[in-house]
Amino acid sequence: MKAYQLRPGAGVAELALTRIATPQPRPHEVLIKTHAAALNYRDLMYARGNYINLAEAPLVPAGDGAGEIVAVGADVTRFAVGDRVTHSYFESWIDGKPDPYKTAAAFGTHINGTLAEFFVAPQDTLVAIPAHLDYAEAATLSCVGTTAWNTLFSDGGLLPGATVLLQGTGGLSIFTLQVAKAAGLRVIITSSSDAKLARARELGADETINYRTTPEWQDEVLRLTGGRGVDLTVEVGGEDTIARSLTATRMGGVVSVIGGLTGFGGASIEPLALIAGVKRLSGIFVGSRAMLDELSNFIAATKLRPIVDRVFAFDEAPQAYAHLESGKQFGKVVVKVAD
């Protein structure tokens, strides 16, 4: 089969389209014909070699995929040939709390991913695609979809009427905006682009802040919330933003730490801000298949359609990586593998 391979740390320039053997499903696995693969920031980190627990051998990159089951192992009972499916981010985190075993293997960074004509996955990692979604939309659910659901509800415990602060207009932030508004939450979102903020308002954002023209954006968040602060901040900026996020979050609120676009090593946090504010920093590492199940049911009920910024052809995968790296996207970047 045709597949891309990449060695961690080799850089996007070394992303190579090649031919490898089509994998064969073991008794508990299925073989999926890949129709679409979605990219995430962690795929850039893998290419740069600064993701976590990487091996040295090249593998098929990209962790998000959606497709059609074309073969099943002898012990498979949950799905059948012809079913449209996507998969959970981790091979072994099916339900319950995370632990080192459950989060040891992620598609596209630790085991072969989805940037290939076919991929295999254990049946227990799979979720049926909501009927109204196409494959490009469904390919976005595994990573950012599950992360959004975990952040807002599984870990965040938010209820309708709560206020959320989102940073930027990349794939995670826009997906979280869509889910939050469909669930009755109030959303404040930041960006350096007024054009992107206007698009965010079209999707339901209640308040927008340009952090270039308003560098002390945490003060604007407090003004917009009457001095109270938001119930939950989705922190993706890293060392340059986390202190501001704590300021913008209400007493007793949560800062969900998901990414570090500005780096991870130089953040300075005043412990007293956590103690006196009774605030919680919560690390979010995507989530379980059970969370993806809940998200899928929610999407089916609300008819939510994830925003796809651009779909690239299979032989344009390097250009898809470059587009993601440029930061120009609004929503998700997807590679179309098959019709």
Image: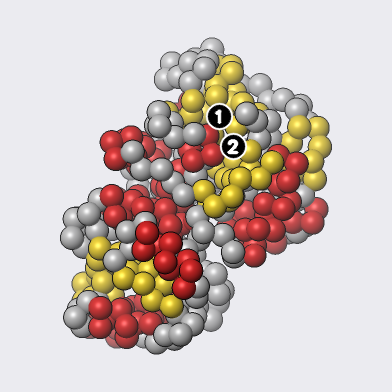
242 left or right of 325 in image: left
Label for residue 36?
2
Q: In which quarter of the image is the N terminus?
A: top right
Q: Determine the residue positioned at 49% across, 40% down.
A: 137
Looking at the image, which is closer to me, 1 or 57? 1
The quarter holding residue 233 reads bottom left
Circles 2, 1 touching at the beta carbon (< 8 Å): yes
Q: Position of residue 329 (x, y in %)?
A: 56, 59
Position of the C terminus by quadrant? top right
Q: Residue at x 48, y 38 (%)?
A: 138
* Number of on-image labels: 2
Q: With respect to residue 292, does 41 lie above or below?
A: below
Count residues near mark 1 (Cα–Cα under 10 Å), then give few for <14, some for 14-19, many for 20+: many
Identify the residue under disc 1.
67
Return the residue nearer the eye: 133 or 13.
133
Whether residue 33 is situated above or below residue 161 in the rendered picture: above
Which residue is painted at 59% across and 37% down in the image? 36
User: Relative to residue 287, is residue 281 depicted above or below?
Assistant: below
Q: Percent position (x, y) of residue 324? A: 62, 58
In this view, 10 is above or below 88:
below
